[in-house]
Amino acid sequence: MSDTRYAIAAVLVAAAITWGLRALPFAALTPLRASKTVQYLSARMPAGVMVILLAYCLRDLSFTHARSLAPLAALAVTIGLHLWRRNALLSILGGTAVHVILASTVFTS
């Protein structure tokens, strides 16, 4: 087999495998949409994931140092913005901005 035929065959096999791997999740999702378990998890998981992320982010926070006020203030701003506007993007950006500003200006070491 010539090098050109081998290269074309390799590209076609790679394209077929890539297409198949990208189509597989959509084919597997169709029967899952009617599942009561998936519907339950889709309603409950976002809040659960946020609680886990919150615990992970605050697990090493020392409450004895003044520097720990920056993440706590950012958390308060994030919660406040979300309760006020119910906009996830605004909450995340606002909390991040407060944390970056406080950590880089007020609580520098």
Image (spheres, grey):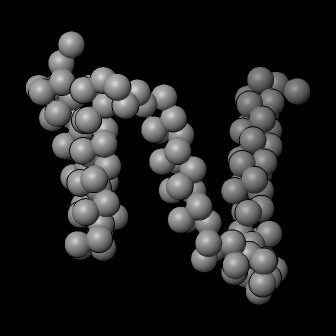
In the rendered image, the vertical position of residue 76 relative to residue 103, given as above or below: below
Residue at 30% x, 23% y: name it: 65
Closest to the observer, 17 or 68: 68
Residue at 62% x, 72% y: name it: 44
- On the question of residue 80 being in view, the answer is yes
Residue 28: percent from left, percent from top: 80, 69
Residue 12: percent from left, percent from top: 75, 45
* Residue at the far left in the pictured view: 105
**Quarter residue 35 falls in:** bottom right
Marker count (numbered): 0
In the rendered image, the vertical position of residue 72 relative to residue 30, given as above or below: above
Residue at 60% x, 77% y: name it: 43
* Residue at the far top in the pictured view: 109
Residue at 31% x, 42% y: name it: 72
Residue 50: percent from left, percent from top: 51, 56
> Can you say which quadrant of the picture contains the C terminus?
top left
